[in-house]
Amino acid sequence: MKIRIEHVAYWVEDLESVKGFYETYFDATSGDRYENKTKGFKSYFLTLGAGARIEIMQKSNIEENNHKGQIMGLAHIALSLGSKRAVDQFTQKMQAVGIPIVGKPRTTGDGYYESVIADPEGNLIELTV
């Protein structure tokens, strides 16, 4: 059996804003918006360069979480950029356009070289080699 993650999904408040963020900064390609009016549900699948997929979802009755990134469950999405130089350059680009830098580029105790940014809703994205 060959197992791989098919996609990662998370709830957002503003689908269009988060979709635009991934399209603009990660060259994501978006599928058509799915909507189930009965359930008050909307989503997009976003495909990144190497085929990784992220589903961003919105539902009318999801309660706002005032402590994003600080709850049990998904902590971050890690995206590999291929090299330390790419991590450094991309982090600098994000800072230059006002994207929040949560963690500056560094080598972690477990050997990862990474930085951490936040999407428009504060969800964490780890940029790594």
Image (tube, rainbow, N blue to C red):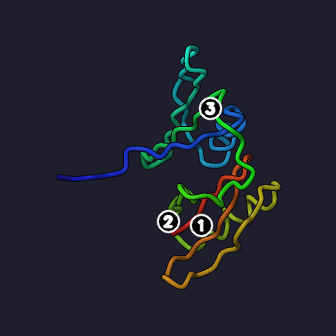
Q: Is residue 76 left or right of residue 121?
A: left
Q: How many numbered tags mark residues here?
A: 3
Where is residue 33? Give x, y as percent: 57, 23
Q: Nearer the viewer, residue 94 or 4?
A: 4
In this view, the residue farthest toward the top is 38
Label 1 to label 3, Cα distance in Å?
Answer: 32 Å
In this view, the residue farthest toward the left is 1
Label 2 to label 3, Cα distance in Å?
Answer: 31 Å
Residue drawn where x is 66% and y is 62% of the image: 90
Q: Nearer the viewer, residue 69 or 96?
A: 69
User: Which of the labelled discs sits on residue 15, or is there none?
Assistant: none
Residue drawn where x is 43% and y is 44% of the image: 7
Residue of label 1 = 86
From this view, report whether residue 100 is shown above or below residue 56: below
The amino acid pointed to by label 2 is Gly
Callout in the foreground (1, 3): 3
Q: Which one is earlier in the sequence, the residue at label 1 or at label 3?
A: 3
Residue drawn where x is 58% and y is 34% of the image: 57
